[in-house]
Amino acid sequence: MNHEKLSMRLESVANYIPKNSILADIGSDHAYLPCYAILKGLASKAIAGEVAEGPFQSARQQVKQTELEQLVEVRKGDGLEVLSPNEATCITIAGMGGSLISNILESGKEKLDGVKRLILQPNVGASNIRYWLIENGWELIDEEILEEDEKIYEILIAEKGDPLRAYRSDRDSGIFLGPFLKENRNGTFLKKWSLEKAHWKKILKQLEEKGQSPEIAQKRRELEKKIKMVEEAIKE
């Protein structure tokens, strides 16, 4: 790794780290993000958490190579168990599914004391995270959607506050599509949901050929609701 350069995805995550944060990067892999945050002056101290032995050793090696052992501590453990309450002010969790990120936050809720900002980058299932944030008093304050290497990623930024503030107009659609993303509707957003809509329409056609059982009818209703939300968002 070039110590000054991250992937576009992780650099976008880093852009939301408040200056002088005490950063905890959960599922840190090679510890690229915490090392970058220190080198760029975004964090004054960082913790890289990793549950698997291979990535844990890779993270330790990366920290050693960048000569940041005094500022980046690599810890082995599952999710937020690597932290103590009131230890980190900013937590990043990137490159996982939305359900897994939500489970990590839920399992380690008591470790979120003192955390001022969550920066979460799910590969899929961002709506799961939005549900969790609402249910746990975190306000979604910004979002970003980007494409890198033909994959589309969403980044969610949350702080303690009014968990429903971002969803004033249409809560269901906002949770599903992202209230800030839906408002901005950039090219990546339109591409993602146009592709999803086309995929769902193919599934609908296949379901129509299978008959009219209650299970199939339920699946059709769910898909039709998603398609309607996407069509309305794109049309706006």
Image (cartoon, rainbow, N blue to C red):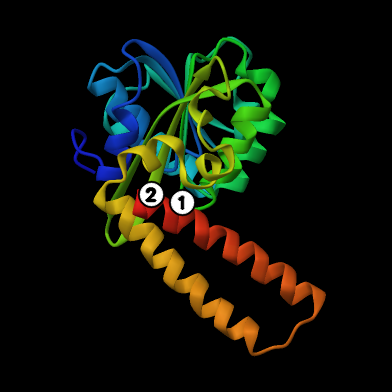
Dot 2, crowdedness within 10 Å: few (<14), some or many (≥20)? many
Report the front residue among 155 and 59.
155
Give the amino acid type for the residue marked by disc 2 in the picture.
Answer: Tyr
For disc 1, the neighbor class at 10 Å (few under 14, some 14 to 19, many from 20) is some
Q: Are marks 2 and 1 in contact (CB under 8 Å)?
A: yes
Outermost residue on the right side: it is 214
Q: Which mark, residue 187?
A: none
In this rendering, position of residue 148 left or right of residue 128: left
Q: Label 2, label 1: how many angstroms apart (C-alpha)?
A: 6 Å
Residue at 36% across, 38% down: 183
Q: Is disc 2 placed on a helix, strand or loop?
A: strand
Please name the residue shown 32% across and 39% down the image.
10
Question: Looking at the picture, how far across and down is residue 104, in whole percent?
Answer: 63, 36
Q: Amino acid at mark 1?
A: Asn
Report the residue at 52% width, 28% height from top. Answer: 168
Q: State the residue in front, 55 or 107.
A: 107
Q: Position of residue 62 (x, y in %)?
A: 34, 36
Which quadrant: the N terminus?
Answer: top left
Residue identified by numbered label 2? 153
Q: Is residue 178 shown to the viewer in this render?
A: yes
| Residue 100 in picture, x, y percent from top left | 61, 45
